[in-house]
Image (cartoon, rainbow, N blue to C red):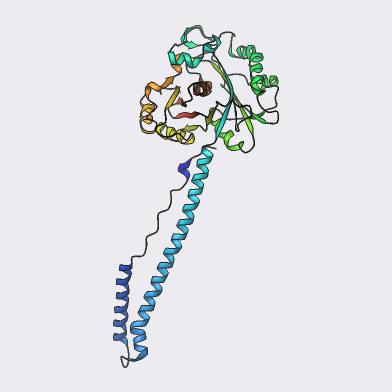
Amino acid sequence: MPVVLEKIPEKKARPPRPVIRRWLIFGAAVLISGMGLTFLFWQGERSGPGFWLFAVVLPLLIWGAMFSARRAGYKYQCVGQDAANRTIKVRHATDKVRGQRFAWFTGEFLVNALEREYKPTQKAAFSKSPILQPVVPRGAEKPVRHSRLPGGENAPDMLTSLQAEMAGRINKLLDSLPSSMTCYLALDVAEDLPDLSLSWLSEISRPVIRIRDLSGLRIIDYWLDYHYEKPSALLVISVQLNDLPENDSGEAISVVLMTNCRLKDTPPVSVRLHRPQISHNGDLGHALRYAMLWAGLEKGTPLRGWVTGGTLASSDALSNACDIYAPELTVQRYVNIDAVAGFAGIAAPWQALILATRQCLADREAQMVVTESSSDFRQLCAVTPE
């Protein structure tokens, strides 16, 4: 459930105070009118208590009752406004605290064409050493500029050949968790690939609870909301393999393990994965502002960015947003992953998150992941050092 602070009403303005000068003028008008009507319609001697009661006292009593009612209404409005604003303030603070929940990074591994050659992807990205090259795809004869995992006649065969290796590495990650901790699993796999739950899950030695029907970084968003009260872990397995790839695409298998509490064996030097901000309206500035807020980052905080998907690296949308909300995140300080390893499709945000985590561990500097799946769908997530 995303945190949307805009849904919280604005604080109510103070109701207008009664203007004493106007009420005094109105009182004088009421008194003059009362005296005039009494003099006009009074029968008999214009003296005595009865005459002056109608001429002076009654108009003053009517004016006083009206002024008292107006004053009481003003006080009632003030009390209601104060109560409403207290509720709005509490709701804003509560949602902000919920938005600033984060996960502790526990472990990861990444499989792509670079990692298969024992070349760390983040170092290749920094040195701008691309592995993209014309290759013949598994399902076509025409070469495509693409970074492909070696082996396999097609994507299902590739997954089958990797099953034992991946399961062993996943089990090694899960061994770092306490035996009593609940572990949730999310499979974020491209639609044209086989269901990993039918094969890979049988190889995982630890019981896991499946999170279904979610994709992308919103998995973290969901888990932080619905499984935050009790200590738990989240394992995300994301796979993108392409039998018929597009130009400048890539293949990747990303595995990330995180917990909602600090484990006893967590190293002193660790990182936090903050709540992602999902943008559906194309307003990148709005998304960046809230991604910074969820991570508790100030406007002038030094940042490094990891960009993947779409035309983010070449368009002005990201640089314009950074100029307003993160001026330290300049063009020179964000890395275009796609120029080195290609766009990894559904695995792209997880691959970028892994690279940001590695760099955060290395230089102890906040990182920002920005993924564009389409012009109106972007995912942002901050990674900060402990």
At x 31% / y 68%, what residue is drawn?
A: 22
Q: For this rendering, which residue is in front, 322 or 145?
A: 322
Residue at screen point 48% across, 22% down: 363
Residue 10: x and y in percent read 43, 48
Q: Position of residue 12 (x, y in %)?
A: 42, 53
Residue closer to the observer: 20 or 50: 20
- In the rendered view, does 95 fall on the left or right side of 206? left
- The answer to whether residue 379 shows anywhere in this view is yes
Query: Foreground: 6 or 332?
Result: 332
Where residue 376 sits, quadrant-wise, is top left
Furthest toward the front, the residue is 268
Residue located at (42% from left, 28% from top): 302
In which quadrant will I find the N terminus? Answer: top right
Give how far across and how far down residue 237 sits, in percent. 60, 22
Q: Is residue 144 above or below residue 268?
A: above
Looking at the image, which residue sits at the far bottom? 45
Q: Is residue 270 above or below residue 144?
A: below
Q: Quadrant of residue 318?
A: top left
Q: Position of residue 317 (x, y in %)?
A: 37, 28
Quadrant of the rendered image containing residue 186: top right
Q: Is residue 246 visible?
A: no
